Image: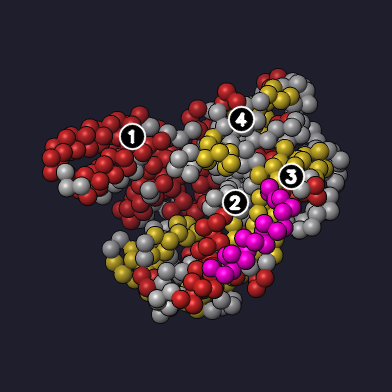
Amino acid sequence: MIPFPKKKFILPVVASAFLFVGVSFKDDFFEVAKQVEIFTTLFKELNKNYVDETNPGDLMDKAIKGMLTSLDPYTVYFNEQDVVKFKINNTGEYTGIGAIITRKEDKIIIREPYKNFPADKAGLKAGDEIIQIGDVLLSDFKDDASQLFRGAKNTKIEVKYIRQGKTNTAQITLDEIEIKSVPFYRKIDDKTGYIVLAKFNQKASFETKQALEQLKKEGAERIVLDLRGNPGGLLNEAVNICNLFVPKNEIIVTTKSKIEKHNNTYKTSKEPVDTEIPLAILVDGKSASASEIVSGALQDLDRAVVIGSRSFGKGLVQRPVDLTYGTQLKVTISRYYTPSGRCIQALDYSQKDKNGVAKKTEAKNYNAFKTRKGRTVYDGGGIQPDIEMEETKLSPITEALEKNDGIFNYATAYYYKNPNLGDKIPTFTDADFLDFKNYLKVQKFSFDTETELALKNTLAVAKKEKVDESISVEYQQLLTALQKSEEKLLDKSQKEIKNLILDEIIKRYQYQEGLYQYYLKNNAEIKKAVSVLNNNVEYKSILKM
């Protein structure tokens, strides 16, 4: 939202308070009215005549969301419950349990409890599987279970959860939760400050400014701004954050649409905090939309050195439109362009393959642009860092481990095997990595790579056609060969996997803050940023100063 993904800036005046960075609407009102009438007639007749009882609200919800899937993934419909969550993402405030959660089958999984918030105070840990909330069994509840954690401040909620195979109970007392845009900032050394910007909600620029000014008071003469993993948020906040480092009236981003009123140029409107302080920005493949506006604009203006790996590539802008009965549509209204004229959108949703997957812009089709001082930059595939670090890119096997919770689940098991580490930073040895691989075997972990899924699908079809027995030997040979190949790939990617496992383990003992503290002295991208900022000749050479 920009999923960026989830703030007020009057420049220029727009119809909505929020624009998200990441219409073809023909004025054929007769055709629109005709299709609406057809659908309305169909909907009425379906609900009146269908043999079983229907749920009109559920049917309409699915119909609308099904229609929007043919567009891009950022154009979405919010029912009344969705609107509440949408508001939470944008304001950064809500009443709840203070934890990142995901739904998996008939359980809610605690991914990360925030330190000293309700879930943490109730004793819940990452990896806990909540199976019942109050009187509601999640196996019987198919709607969004997170709404069961809503309520007034001090509301007490009983939960039942599974931890390491044992069923436990806990009582959570709801409280006001404030999600910080800047969860951490510190000095790396005597002269270098470090700011983590995790999301672009309404408080993003305010919190970033506070952190910057405090670090300068403490003697910081250089800044590392960490946008890794930041999915984006509010466009105006991206402009405001750039304004901390560049002068007033500087063009930061331009939006272009089929509708004239959505064509806007966004300039900085305030006096900056510091236009001279050396600045390094960290990005990765999960830095999207508003993160790409900040990193792209400051790169185009030769104001910062960008370090890491190519960003996600979301160059689309969304706007929320209020509908009837408290519902809402978040619709893609335009593309955004950085000061040099780049649109960094990586996927073309108007061009899809036979499986309905949007096609990615190929590198050979990227267009070249020039920064203010004449450096060459490219569009079409995210923000390419000035210093690209190969070790920051994840291999497909590592992405599969993350996607299917191999690393997350192993870290949970490790935590309960080693309960007394406390504030100690664990080391993850070769022996530990061997233990990790054995864990995957024992758990019969499925990587679900494209090859593995294709092989499983082949067997499923063979069973359906009743020819599986005749190919069982060959299938098993292929499966064994694939598993050996996957093990080799694990060994090849051992370093990056070890780092991710260690990150997850540190969070179990010391929360997110402990991980950032560890990064200050051990993270490769931060080390590189400090090195560049400490070398004035190299820094100026990169920016052609």
Mark nearer the N terminus (4 vs 1): 4
Q: In this view, does 4 lie to the left or right of 321?
A: left
* Pick the front one: 173 or 102: 102
Q: How far apart are marks 4 and 3 (CA)?
A: 25 Å
> Disc 4 versus disc 1: distance between alpha carbons?
27 Å
The reply to whether dot 4 and dot 2 touch (C-beta < 8 Å) is no
Judge whether residue 40 is colored magenta: yes
Task: Find numbered disc 2 in the image and state the secondary structure of the residue it sits on.
Answer: loop
Give neighbour class at mark 4: few <14, some 14-19, many 20+ (Cα, 10 Å).
Answer: many
Residue 458 on the magenta segment: no
Which mark is in front, 4 or 1?
4
Q: Where is residue 147 in the image (x, y as percent from the top left)?
A: 52, 71
Q: Which amino acid does label 2 sit on?
A: Tyr
Majority secondary structure in the magenta region: helix
Q: Quick one: label 2 or label 1, which is nearer the N terminus?
A: 2
Image: 202 above or below 334: below
Callout 3: 10 Å neighbours few (<14), some, many (20+)?
some
Q: Which of marks 2 and 3 is in front?
A: 3
Q: Which amino acid does label 1 sit on?
A: Leu
Q: Identify the mark at residue 384; answer none if there is no mark.
A: 4
Residue on which the image places disc 2 = 74
Lower sequence index among marks 4 and 2: 2
Front position in the image: 413 or 464: 464
Q: What stretch is highlighted in magenta?
A: 23-42
Q: Which residue is drawn at 17% across and 44% down?
A: 468
Count all numbered tags in the image, as a single digit.
Answer: 4
Residue type indicated by callout 3? Ser
Which residue is the site of mark 1?
A: 490
For the residue labelled by badge 1, is the local secondary structure a helix, a strand or a loop? helix
Residue with the mark numbered 3: 257
Q: Which of 4 and 454 is in front in this view?
A: 454
